[in-house]
Amino acid sequence: MIIAPSLLAADFGHFARETLRADRGGGDWLHLDIMDGHFVPNISFGPEVVHAIRPLTRMTFDVHLMCSRREILLEPFAEAGADRITVHVELGEKVGPLIWKIKSLGKKVGLAVNPPTAITTAEPFLKQIDLLLVMTVNPGFGGQPFISETLPKIQQADAWRREKQLAYRLEVDGGINLKTAAECAHAGADTFVSGTTLFGQGRLKTAVKKMRAAVNAAAPRRKPA
Ligand code: DX5
Ligand code: ZN
């Protein structure tokens, strides 16, 4: 189980301090939401910020690109220190070339699916990706309520993984608190992005620990294959 605090919910006046907080608090990955004000109605931060915090931690940098022209952003984020880059299936015909570009940069590939988008749109790419991100809110802002209608999509993505004997991680992002993290874990998710619930707490370490315990307890018990 991977717990990934999302820097979007951190104090933007202190990126360095907040990165260290996530690291010392036991976060496995640092989730970095990149918003361009076009693909989503909000602007966050760019490669310069990622570059600045890269030397502070060995945490995996999980870059979630919510940008219309992400083909121009892949190299800058790869150079800035991203370990993993996720693009959205809603980009349509651009998705195939983007996946191969991310691979050619030596980074792990993620594919994200928004709540209104059918999970079947991701099916043709499953063999090529390292991670499938089922968005559990409409992207753009932190602090939104979890959309429970996304749970069957998580179940479907997990079922495909077993049926097709694939090993992509199954990530959820948006409105993830202790209760919804457990619901997603029960549905098959193994990677949990959480902003408000983790950074919003005085003690991020306690929040991470509680979330880890909640998802481990809720995960389906399966016999080894
Ligand atoms: C939403 C972002 C999320 C966001 C989650 O567009 O993709 O990563 O940081 O924030 P919370 O956990 O506050 O819903
Ligand atoms: Zn995100």
Image: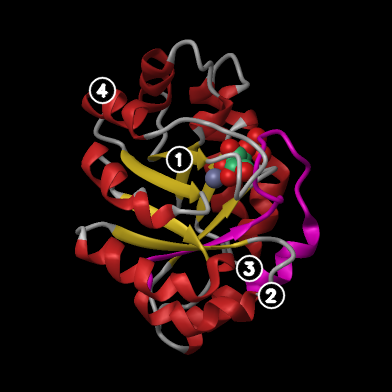
Under mark 1, the amino acid is: His
Q: Residue at x 79, y 63 (%)?
A: 149
The quadrant of the picture showing ligand 2 is: top right
Q: Residues within 10 Å of mark 4 (few under 14, many from 20)?
A: few
Q: How is the image coloured?
A: secondary structure
Secondary structure category for the residue under label 3: helix
> Who comes first in sequence, dot 3 or dot 1?
1
> Who comes first in sequence, dot 2 or dot 3?
2
Q: Which residue in the protein does label 4 denote? A: 56
User: Is residue 209 part of the magenta span, yes or no?
Assistant: no
> Who comes first in sequence, dot 3 or dot 4?
4
Q: Which residue in the protein does label 3 denote? A: 154
Q: Respond yes or no on whether mark 2 lies under 8 Å from ligand 1.
A: no
Q: Nearer the viewer, mark 2 or mark 3?
A: 2
Left/right placement of residue 28 relative to residue 188 reads left
Q: Start and end of the magenta stretch?
A: 129-155
Residue 177 in sight here? no
Under mark 3, the amino acid is: Ile
How far apart, in angstroms, are the residues tagged by discs 3 and 4? Answer: 33 Å
State the mark number for residue 118: 2
> Who comes first in sequence, dot 4 or dot 1?
1
Under mark 2, the amino acid is: Ala
Left/right placement of residue 116 relative to residue 164 reads right
Residue 187 location, x and y as percent? Answer: 65, 66
> Who comes first in sequence, dot 2 or dot 1?
1
State the mark number for residue 31: 1
Q: Residues within 10 Å of mark 3 (few under 14, many from 20)?
A: many
How far apart, in angstroms, are the residues tagged by discs 2 and 1? Answer: 24 Å
Residue 157 location, x and y as percent? Answer: 57, 74
